[in-house]
Image (spheres, helix red, strand yellow):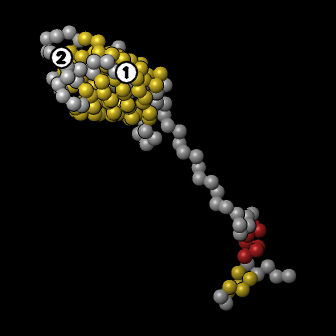
Amino acid sequence: MRNTMEIGGYRAVIAVVLLLAGCSESSAPPPPPPPEPLPPRENITGTYEGQLGAWALRIRLTDNDGALAGSYAVRTSPTGEFEDGGTLMGTAVQRPTQSLTQDVTLTLAGTLVGTFTGTATGRSRLAGTIEYQPGDGSGGPQTVEITLTRSGF
């Protein structure tokens, strides 16, 4: 018995090569290596402040492994005090390709009702867009770009 095969005028020692390689013609390619694990997600617990149109906005966040909860307060005049606006809840999910950037979605309830969608880079800032309904009845929902900077907790 011969371990050769005629292919287009050339002789190939296919069976012997496959036997030495330890595989068969029907073997599947090896599975891809597992993806590299992400570094630990950054906790974004803290207090963040920023401007929302003519208002100043302060958000206090507690990050419990990606489940966000907290409260916000607004100051409607430069000389006024911050007034409690209500509670907020949301999520922070780490992007698979950027270890320090997280997708953040917050839903605010109370005087200022709206949703903030943006990113957190480390614990130093939140940046994105907030769509909100002013509590003073000054028109329909408004959307503005907003950056919140961490100021302590």
Q: Please, what is the three-letter code of the amino acid marked with disc 2?
A: Thr
Please tell me which residue is depicted at 21% across the width and 30% down the height of the picture: 140
| Left or right, 39 with reference to 17 | left
Q: At which x and y percent is residue 7?
A: 68, 85
Task: Name the disc covering residue 76, or none.
Answer: 2
Q: Secondary structure at mark 1?
A: strand
What residue is at 25 percent from the left and 26 percent from the top? 133
Viewer can see residue 49: no
- Give coordinates of residue 153: x percent, y percent: 35, 14
Inter-mark Cα distance, 1 to 2: 19 Å
Above or below, comparing residue 130 to residue 7 in the picture: above
Callouts 1 and 2 close, C-beta under 8 Å = no
The residue depicted at 58 percent of the width and 46 percent of the height is: 34
Q: Which mark is residue 88?
A: 1
Picture residue at 29% right of the left edge, 12% below the top = 84
Spot occupied by residue 54 in the image (x, y as percentages of width and height): 15, 23
**How many neighbours does mark 2 have within 10 angstroms: few (below 14), some (14-19), or many (20 or more)?**
some
Ranked by sequence position, the earlier of labels 1 and 2 is 2
Q: Residue furthest right?
A: 1
